């Protein structure tokens, strides 16, 4: 047995025999009460609880650990160790899963067992249970490695087991819970009939708006909005990309900045700014009323408002996708077309545009999915135009608390986004017309035909100016009394939110926003590195290792990208509100939620960077006696710095700006900035909301700087481009 | 070298990737202190074989022994083997000294000692003074020597080279090739060396293992392979060869009478039965003359190229198109000239298994 396998076995023993098995609520480990009846009672360990008969189902967990102890005592390395370790890990895990799910906080989850064994209940998993489960998983991985999995590399098998275990637990299991709860009534009884009633309800699929004045079903609303936003963002993004790459437009830097800003803007802030401009008492509305007697209306609330807000928020994403696509078109193809006497317009129409087609489809699908998943803007601006994400929210938190309805609507939404994701994966995954090759392409990009250029300017420039105005509003809005009515400069909003008072006992953070801001920063700061670790580890496995089922592994790790935040929120409530994993209301659930929502970007960035690093670097390190872990630490990680920065920044920013998922998961103790701001918007305190939003943007900018300073640049020497290590691996 | 050189032994080793068999039941022994080349066209399994020795791939079946020890299931980090990669695989974020000291330092050697070991090996390859440079600041040849120093630093039982010369220009290639051979002999290393260049293999090897289609085609000293190829593939792959249809008339002792067109020659029959056979004739053994010696085959020059040291001719003849090298460059034959073809005493061989 290897030393690390032995260490994991020991950890399993500690977790089972010493640490408190269950989550002890409301008490700190330092209090005497906590330890009063130890090793029995609430904070008792699995061993004592199990064998005292108190929680007899914990008893059998001892068996695999005993076998492990026997192996440890015998010592030495033997060929049959692998089989034993595999058995220990698998048996332990299987039993823990069965025992964990069989009994919840009320009783047996299967009524029949309650009759047989009498009533039993248990709390959520605590330190002991967690340590033991982790140890079993790692022992299983070491066992498989000893049997020759992944070239006998224990680190790699452990990493695969860990990532797979985490993804199954925190992505798959919650989604499965949604599916289960969709066919249950609100008391938890199996009722498939209700599913069909709720699924085919008129409020979901009704087409009344086609032939009458009534509203259409929420599913059609969502779909229509998503398609329109998808098309709109793609067209605008393409216009921006063409201007940036194919014209001599001067202010390209401004263009770039305008595309970065929305990424660090909480999504609903744009909706908020739109209200301040075009709402009934908005700035523009006011001007129109005073100058032209245009009556004040609520036109911005509804489809139009949500559409404009989403266009503003998601066009940058389309731009970032399409700029890569336009860059990827080999200029020599266009030159070839021109030497064949095609005009610039014909070249653009018959060569450039068709080459962009997969990119355009990609951008459309992204806009489509983002619009579907968006929660903040419809919440703020939706008015009577209901979409799935808000409808799900109100099904959970609204007056008619209806979890199974939320589950059914989640399934509808999930079907749409997964469909789009699947289409992208199947149809676009292997099809790229990108024509950049290793060979230098000395061609020059053909400037756009005049007509096309003017079309681009015509759409993009007004739009860019509009975006600029929005950000001016966000900046200024916090410093005036009431946007649209009273432009007296004031710091009142900032003082309400972020006031600090000098008291006799030192500084007192009196502002109402401090709590949520600190929580947000803390959660984001904890989540970001963990997200980067999980993401890059996954990327390493996908880019560098061969194992059975890699394709499926990749698919499920990317899957969480396609699950809308609202669905994640609902699913986490359903899955983690009851034992065996009972973490709702804690800061932990926020961190976990962020890790698995934002991990895919780390995976993508990691794979992209790693595919540029010659594989023989890893192999050289291995042949020099370094194990995989050392190789990752000393060779791969230092070369991966750009990806580390990208995934850290993304994870941090998304943790600070996310709304949809966490609005279900925040609690009084752990409130997040975005949830707090949404609350202020709903209460009509726009000034404070917008002031807080600008503070968030500034915090994120600072965080990005700090991350870049901490991680630093990678050092490759003067002739980076010519370095042989960046060549693809040779045969 | 403090450690004695070790032998490498493959016992019926197979490596499969899904349905593809990359190495098929290969067995061979590399004697301690020898340089053995794995030679073959791309995709023949030679690189996979090398990676199996290194432990970068694990065998699907069979046994691998290094210095009498069974290492079949050991990972690369656990084998006492170092490798010089085709791309050199120098860590771009480390200096030359850090690169070379990497091996000792990851195995827990104190830093000063690791530095000293690195300095010693750098001196051995003649790169003292460049310790502080980054790999990107070195020339291709220097990078190659750093890679060798790094591979030597742990004094491995076996040293592996994966096409080490392919990124060097033609002039440098010959010098580095000689340096590697000299180092190997000086340090008495066991070396496995992969190349697809038969000339390189002939120049450096004690023995050559020719591979084809995931299996060993022939093993032997360079001279054996060139002068006595045991298959059409080997005859064609090692050096150039004219593969001609001939007839074995009679066998007498080890020798046989062979008829090729109008020529009759005597060659070792190599246990080929009488009747139609294949004859491999090296281009330098195809002699051309404008006078007609007895029994010569008549031919006509169809192509002629001047290469400085020699002429290359293609000659159309009744026994097929012949490729010929002629070192008399003074008065070359023009295309269309009729010539008479005879074979030199050496350089023609009966190919078994044809």
Image: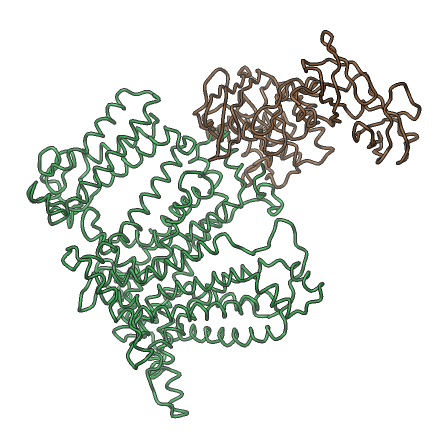
Q: Quadrant of residue B29?
A: top right
In the image, B281 versus B255, the foreground residue is: B255
In the image, A332 versus A248, the foreground residue is: A332
The x, y position of residue A197, in whole percent, is 21, 65
In the image, A541 versus A714, the foreground residue is: A541
The x, y position of residue A531, in whole percent, is 37, 50
Q: Colour of chain A?
A: green
The quadrant of the image that shows the C terminus of chain A is top right
The x, y position of residue B273, in whole percent, is 68, 15
Residue B49 visible at all: yes
The total number of labels drawn is 0
Q: Is residue B194 above or below residue A584?
A: above
Residue name at image x 27 percent, y 20 percent: A74
Chain that the image shows in brown? B
Q: Is residue A205 above or below residue A148?
A: below
The quadrant of the image that shows the N terminus of chain A is top left
Residue name at image x 51 percent, y 60 percent: A359
Q: Say left or right for A623 vs A48.
A: right
Q: Say left or right for A222 vs A12.
A: right
The x, y position of residue A682, in whole percent, is 26, 73
In the image, A649 versus A340, the foreground residue is: A340
Residue A492 visible at all: no
């Amino acid at each position: 047995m290897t030393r690390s396998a032995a260490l994991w076995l020991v950890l399993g023993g500690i977790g089972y025999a010493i640490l408190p098995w269950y989550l002890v609520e409301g008490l700190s480990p330092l209090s005497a009460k906590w330890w009063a009846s130890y090793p029995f009672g609430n904070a008792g360990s699995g061993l004592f609880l199990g064998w005292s008969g108190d929680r007899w189902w914990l008893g059998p967990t001892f068996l695999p650990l005993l076998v492990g102890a026997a192996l440890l005592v015998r010592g030495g390395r033997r060929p049959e160790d692998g089989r034993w370790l595999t058995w220990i890990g698998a048996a332990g895990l299987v039993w823990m899963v069965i025992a964990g799910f069989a009994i919840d906080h009320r009783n047996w989850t299967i009524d029949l067992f309650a009759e047989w064994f009498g009533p039993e209940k248990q709390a959520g998993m605590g330190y002991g249970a967690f340590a033991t489960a982790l140890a079993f998983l790692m022992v299983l991985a070491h066992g498989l490695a000893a049997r020759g999995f992944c070239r006998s590399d224990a680190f790699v098998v452990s990493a695969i087991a860990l990532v797979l275990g985490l993804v199954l637990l925190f992505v798959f299991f919650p989604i499965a819970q949604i599916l289960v709860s969709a066919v249950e009534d609100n008391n938890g009884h199996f009722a498939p009939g209700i599913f069909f009633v709720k699924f085919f309800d008129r409020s979901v699929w009704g087409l009344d708006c086609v032939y009458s004045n009534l509203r259409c079903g929420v599913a059609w609303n969502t779909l229509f909005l998503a398609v329109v936003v998808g098309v709109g963002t793609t067209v605008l993004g393409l216009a921006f990309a063409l201007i940036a790459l194919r014209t001599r437009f001067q202010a390209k830097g401004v263009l770039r900045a305008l595309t970065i800003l929305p990424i660090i803007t909480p999504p609903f802030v744009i909706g908020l700014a739109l209200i301040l401009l075009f709402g009934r008492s908005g700035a523009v509305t006011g001007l129109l009323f005073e100058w032209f007697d245009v009556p004040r209306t609520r036109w911005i609330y509804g489809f139009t408002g949500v559409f404009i807000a989403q266009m503003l928020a998601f066009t940058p994403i389309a731009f970032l996708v399409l700029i890569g696509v336009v860059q990827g078109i080999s200029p020599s193809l266009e030159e070839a077309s021109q030497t064949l006497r095609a005009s610039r317009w014909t070249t653009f129409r018959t060569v450039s545009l068709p080459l962009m087609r997969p990119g355009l489809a990609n951008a459309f699908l992204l806009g489509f999915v983002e619009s579907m998943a968006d929660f903040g803007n419809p919440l703020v601006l939706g008015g009577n135009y209901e979409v799935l994400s808000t409808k799900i929210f109100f099904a959970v938190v609204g007056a008619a608390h209806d979890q199974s309805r939320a589950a059914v609507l989640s399934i509808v939404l999930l079907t749409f986004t997964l469909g789009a994701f699947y289409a992208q994966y199947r149809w676009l995954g292997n099809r790229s017309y990108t024509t950049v090759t290793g060979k230098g392409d000395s061609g020059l990009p053909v400037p756009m035909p005049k007509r096309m250029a003017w079309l681009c300017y015509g759409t993009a420039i007004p739009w860019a100016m509009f975006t600029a105005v929005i950000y001016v509003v966000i900046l200024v809005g916090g410093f005036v009394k009431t946007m649209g009515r009273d432009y007296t400069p004031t710091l009142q909003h900032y003082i309400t939110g972020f006031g600090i008072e000098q008291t006799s006992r030192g500084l007192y953070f009196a502002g109402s926003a401090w709590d949520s801001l600190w929580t947000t920063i803390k959660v984001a700061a904890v989540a970001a590195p963990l997200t980067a670790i999980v993401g890059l580890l996954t990327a390493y496995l996908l880019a560098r290792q061969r194992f059975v089922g890699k394709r499926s592994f990749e698919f499920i790790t990317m899957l969480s990208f396609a699950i809308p935040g609202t669905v994640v929120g609902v699913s986490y409530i359903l899955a983690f509100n009851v034992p065996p994993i009972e973490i709702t209301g804690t800061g932990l659930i926020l961190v976990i939620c962020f890790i698995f929502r934002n991990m895919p970007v780390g995976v993508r960035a990691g794979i992209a960077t790693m595919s540029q690093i010659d594989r023989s670097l890893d192999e050289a390190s291995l042949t020099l006696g370094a194990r995989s872990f050392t190789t990752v630490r000393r060779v791969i990680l230092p070369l991966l710095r750009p990806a580390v920065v990208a995934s850290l920044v993304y994870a941090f920013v998304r943790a600070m700006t996310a709304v949809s998922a966490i609005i279900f998961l925040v609690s009084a103790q752990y409130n997040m900035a975005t949830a707090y701001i949404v609350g202020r918007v709903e209460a009509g305190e726009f000034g404070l909301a917008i002031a807080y939003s600008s503070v968030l943007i500034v915090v994120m900018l600072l965080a990005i700087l700090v991350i870049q300073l901490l991680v630093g640049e990678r050092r490759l020497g003067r002739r980076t481009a010519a370095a042989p290590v960046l060549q693809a691996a040779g045969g | 070298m403090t450690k004695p050189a070790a032998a490498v032994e493959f016992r019926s080793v197979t490596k499969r990737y899904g349905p593809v068999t990359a190495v098929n039941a290969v067995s061979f022994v590399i004697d301690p202190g020898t340089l053995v080349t794995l030679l073959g066209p791309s995709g023949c399994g030679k690189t996979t074989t090398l990676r199996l020795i290194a432990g970068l791939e694990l065998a699907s079946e069979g046994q691998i022994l290094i210095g009498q020890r069974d290492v079949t299931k050991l990972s690369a980090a656990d084998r006492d083997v170092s490798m010089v990669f085709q791309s050199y695989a120098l860590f771009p974020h480390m200096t030359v000294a850090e690169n070379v000291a990497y091996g000792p330092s990851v195995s827990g050697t104190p830093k000063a000692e690791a530095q000293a070991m690195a300095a010693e090996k750098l001196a051995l390859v003649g790169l003292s003074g460049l310790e502080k440079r980054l790999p990107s600041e070195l020339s291709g040849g220097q990078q190659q020597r750093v890679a060798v120093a790094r591979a030597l630093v742990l004094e491995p039982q076996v040293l592996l080279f994966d096409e080490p010369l392919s990124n060097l220009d033609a002039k440098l290639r010959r010098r580095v090739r000689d340096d590697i051979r000299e180092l190997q002999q000086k340090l008495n290393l066991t070396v496995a060396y992969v190349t697809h260049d038969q000339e390189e293999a002939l120049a450096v090897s004690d023995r050559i293992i020719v591979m084809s289609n995931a299996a060993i085609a022939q093993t032997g000293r360079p001279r054996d392979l060139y002068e006595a190829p045991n298959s059409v593939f080997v005859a064609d792959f090692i050096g150039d060869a004219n593969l001609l249809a001939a007839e074995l008339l009679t066998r007498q002792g080890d020798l046989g009478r062979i008829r090729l067109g109008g020529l009759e020659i005597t060659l070792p029959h190599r246990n080929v039965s009488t009747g139609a056979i294949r004859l491999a004739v090296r281009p330098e053994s195809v002699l051309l003359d404008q006078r007609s010696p007895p029994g010569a085959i008549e031919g006509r020059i169809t192509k002629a190229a001047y290469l400085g040291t020699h002429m290359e001719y293609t000659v159309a003849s009744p026994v097929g198109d012949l490729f010929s090298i002629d070192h008399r460059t003074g008065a070359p034959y023009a295309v269309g000239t009729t010539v008479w073809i005879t074979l030199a005493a050496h350089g023609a061989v009966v190919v078994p298994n044809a």
